[in-house]
Image: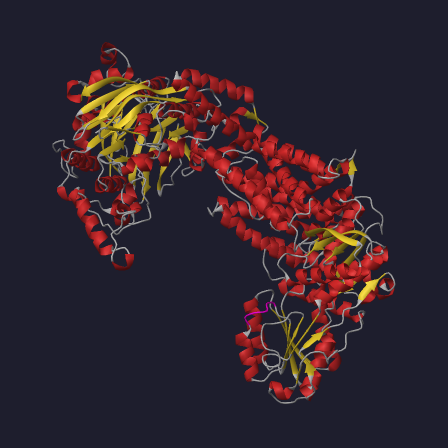
Amino acid sequence: MLSVTGVSKLFPGVKALSDVDFTARAGEVHALVGENGAGKSTLIKVLTGVYQPDAGEVVHDGTPVRFTTPLQAQQAGISTIYQEVNLVPLMSVARNLFLGREPRGRLGLIDFRRMHREAEEALSGLGIRVDVRRPLRELGVGAQQMVALARAVALDARVVIMDEPTSSLEPREVRTLFRVIRMLRERGIAVVYVSHRMDELYEICDAVTVLRDGRVVHTGRLADLDRLRLVSLMLGRDIGEVRSEGLTKFTGSHQAAAEPVLRAEGLTIRHQLHDVSLSIRPGEVVGLGGLLGSGRSETAKVIAGALSADAGRVSVGGVPVRTGSTPAAIRAGISLLPEDRKAEGISPGLSVRENIALAALPGLSRFGLVDNARVDEVVDGFVKRLRIKSAGPHQKVGELSGGNQQKVLLARWLAMHPKVLLLDEPTRGIDVGAKAEVQSLIDELADEGLAVLLISSDTEELIEGSDRIVVLKDGVVVDELTGDAVTEDALMRAIAAEPGAASVPAEPAAPAPTEEAVKPAESAGSTHD
Amino acid sequence: MTDLSLARGQVDRERLLRLLQEYGVYAGVVALLAFNFVFTSNFVSAENFRTQAVQVAPVLIVALGMALAIGTEGVDLAVGSVMALSTSLLSLYLGYGMVPAILMALVGGIAVGLANGSLVAFLGVQPIVATLALMVAARGIALVLLPQLEDVRDPGMASLGSGDVLGVPYLVLIAAALALLVAFVVRRTTFGRQLLAVGDSRPAARLAGLPVRRILIIVYAASGALAAVAGILATARLTASDPTSLGTLMELSAITAVVVGGTPLSGGRIRIGGTVAGAVLIQLLTTTLIKHDLQPSWTQMAQAVVIVAAVYAARERGKR
Amino acid sequence: MKPTALSRRTTARTLLATGLLTSLALTGCTKSEDSGDDKATEQQADAGQEVASPSAGSGPGCTIAAYGGEKLDLKNATVGFSQSEKEANPFRIAETASIRAEAKKRGVKLLTANAQSQFSKQISDVQDLIAKGADVLVIAPLNSDGWEPVLKTASAKHIPIVTVDRKINATACKDYVSFIGSDFVEQGKRAADQMIEATGGKGEIAILLGAAGNNVTTERTKGFVDQIKAEAPGLKVVFQQTGEFAREKGQSVTENLIQSKPGIKGIYAENDEMGLGAVNALKGAGKKAGDVKIVTIDGTRNAVQGIVDGWISGVVESNPRFGPLAFQTLDSFTKGDEVAQDIVIKDTEYTEANAKTDIGKAY
């Protein structure tokens, strides 16, 4: 259907793609995997006409093509669904669906009734029930993505490229998405699927192409490739090495002190948190479990002073911390690595150096003047220790890979010598290698006596990384797993447990059929986990 | 092999574009100077350079404050009205002596800046809206205080406006000193670095524990103070307080100087050198057209072309 | 006498300033206007400037019979005056003061209103004046257009209207009686005559234009340029740039002018403020008084002082003292006599010959 042969693409100083062959076949879901910087995004951009290859050719439907704009690619039937949905948030769902090809009535006016009816049909065909008259932005991210997909299908797309479509979806939304993908496959559409989530790849994909350093290192049927082998291909390491280290880089339990350094009691925010209490001892990693919207991020933000609570107390080392003030929390030794790294974490336009020094700057200054020598010292130290890869300390952080951005953020907080480190999705969206490094770093920090709160939607990471897991559900602490009880099974049971019921078979994401209708108000309110 | 040569061509083009963005404003200044050296009679004279420098000084001082506001992803539309307010206050208090009068004018400018900063920092009002409100209010107050032009006969003010040190007018010395001061604050102080972080990503700055509100308030107060200084110097040069017309459209000149100088409107970066060059570029453009007695509307069109060019360059930069 | 008055005023306004800054309240508005009026009245006392006679005769006339309405004795009538802008510049101050002084002199009851530069306010001001019982109206219009609603109300009651300093787009002797104003082309012409005399009719001269797109600018330019062409071919206009009627702009532009054209002989400034800016520029460039001849229009006290000091050669006055002429016109009209529909007010001029003696009359 759509293929490239011998494609190379150069950027100043980097060869992003080198002699790459890739074929997306009709009726096949093709996984495109690789670490960050392996060349996935570049390849997608070549396929969709954003970039022109420096060498090699793109063949679409049997004929060589040269898309010079994304529009040309779209007109040729190639649709791309990005993580961030690129539709018009203020327009209604139906308008978005029919943007540029609205059904016209007499007088050339838009026939809204017909448009709404057809929009509903198109969406229900994909198993989605929403009010198509509502503005798109009132929908949850997942539902928005469905609209984007429906639009792609309606536009007679022959090839659909999905770049990390599930990164902000809830489990039931993922299920709906997969059903739609299967439907696309049955219709003979070629799907290119990019994701970091291994479970998803094995659930939905037929074929796989692994990229590393701009080259294809493997291509073939996914079923013929076991997980460990896939990881080793991506990392470029031996199987033995990977096996011996397990899939995460955590070592397991830590030696924790007896007295908690952080105590949070009765944290309450109307509609979001209710009487959440937890404590962390020095050298302990406490996991915060729960589904999207259960109040995990809110808990971390309240402790870090980034969100005002209606009630509750936070203390560090027995000293009360004023809530609702980030500077107060930071002075007390609490540091938060926020979930939304790009919007709330890094300062993308500033250099690596400025980003690392940002929070610690007053301490690195004398009489309000920055002591550049000391800043350099601190920055160099962390760049080495955390193995931050950049063109130099003056490169903009926005240009770094996700993993390196995360390391820069960690460095920013470690430079403050915190007592409590709150990590909200520290490895989300970063490549496998950096993920492993961040994970072992968390271990290391706990060993050094830091109290760590870990939030992760990667269950494996949460289980293996945490000494103890506090489980949240709808803003309430429902369980606490300790010692041997820290297992995936126990976590699932805790999450799935119905109020009052002792235990329920673990099938957490099994949705009742009616739940698939997305309720706009609810989704809009809880997208910010 | 062909790949490589292709790539090199692209690298060269990108480097050229980047150079143009970084140094285009300086090239523009040099080009205009060269043009005038050749085609404008009596351009090359100490007297003329003095005139140009004196005329650009108030615009530059206002642009310095504007650069700070734009660096925080904001803007300060009240600067022109602050100039009017400061000239009114100056004139009213001159009876008590030059120093108290200047202090009152500065206090007035800072007060407007604090009001701007509070609206932006505490009430979360968009800077363009907040400063627009103060732009109207400050001009109104200025006219209530001093409804009509009043001559300034204070000899101290007159010598401030036309005096010099070794041939360099006080106005130029003050503008240069302030430019150096602002550049130093931006580059070397904790405050300057934090200011840029606030402009680059406000949520990130807030989560990093920076005193975002305090920084914003100080920035707008500084912009108000600088505009007041510009108003005082313009009054000294004119030897009259004219709150009706002083500073009108100054905000646009200042924004133009800052943007043409390569400071992005999206914040996070401030180029003081570029701002100085931007102000000089606009001054030279106006002067060139005046000296050649071209239609005044041409001046406006030429300015428009420069702004469009600068915004185009900024767009390219943003895409990166 | 004068210094004490001045310092008292300054103190009062200084207090006002402090109050405004701290409270940012606008309670001071009325107070400030009062002080402006005080000043105006005080100024009017020593400004016994001769005022133009109603040089009627030229152009079509208007009688009460043609306009409609009944005769009345102006002495017993109520006169309404609607001012367009705040009395913030010398022209408006003198204009309002002149109307007030004349009403006082004639013992006529006067109602006044000020539109503060808002046209909608002026419309309602005039309607208010009518409602309050004004028998005749003097209007200084802010705009030329948009007067239909008010004129309808007025003509229904047959209220005679005289507009001053700016014409309105309506039919004379039907919607209003007369317009009294200056002839701006004539002002430019007279400025040209002064320029010719000052320079001896030879050399290069420059024009500091007023704000672009303003009829005052166009007419003052036309009168000047045409007269120069006709009378002194030896004078060449080599430079025309706008100073936007502001002193600062006049100064900046002149600074550039005298550097690029050092041989410039004369500068025609289309208002006093730009002329005073030009004086500043010349002083700054080390020129001596009289090196470059400056001719301006308006006749403010500062400009006339410039003649006394030798920096300005001549000033053509744009007369704001409409009071006597307006009342005289209304008096004749209400008595039943014919008055002209367009009345040109007499503008005087100041030169070295009369500046010293007449400076007290300048506004």
- The colour scheme used here is secondary structure
**In x, y percent, where is residue B82?**
62, 49
Task: Tell me where residue A13 sits by quadrant.
Answer: top left
At horizontal 74% and vertical 68% (from top left) the residue drawn is: C319
Name the residue: 74% across, 46% down. C257
Q: Position of residue A295 (x, y in %)?
A: 29, 37
A382 w.r.t. A313: above or below = above
Asked if C43 appears above or below A517 in the picture, the reply is below
Q: Which quadrant holds residue A2?
A: top left
Looking at this view, is C142 or A446 the one in front? Answer: C142
Decide if residue B8 is on the left or right side of residue C188: left
Picture quarter with the C terminus of chain A? top left
Figure check: A139 above or below A187:
below
Considering depth in this image, is A457 or A6 the residue closer to the camera? Answer: A6
Can I make out residue A438 in this image?
A: yes
Residue A480 occupies quadrant = top left
Residue at left 54%, top 80%?
A: C153
Indicate left or right for A479 with C188 as reference. Answer: left
Does C265 sit left or right of C209 as displayed?
right
- Residue B47 to residue C294: above or below: above
Q: Tell me the quadrant of the picture where the N terminus of chain A can be found.
A: top left
Picture mark count: 0
Q: Position of residue B285 (x, y in %)?
A: 63, 41
Front one among B125 and A266: B125
Q: Position of residue C272 (x, y in %)?
A: 74, 58
Main secondary structure found in the magenta portion: loop
Q: Is residue A416 visible?
A: no
Instruction: Please say whether residue B12 is one of the residues in the magenta stretch.
Output: no
The front one of A313 and B178 is B178
Q: Residue furthest left?
A: A505
From which residue to which does the magenta span run? C142-146
Decide if residue A294 is on the left or right side of residue C82: left
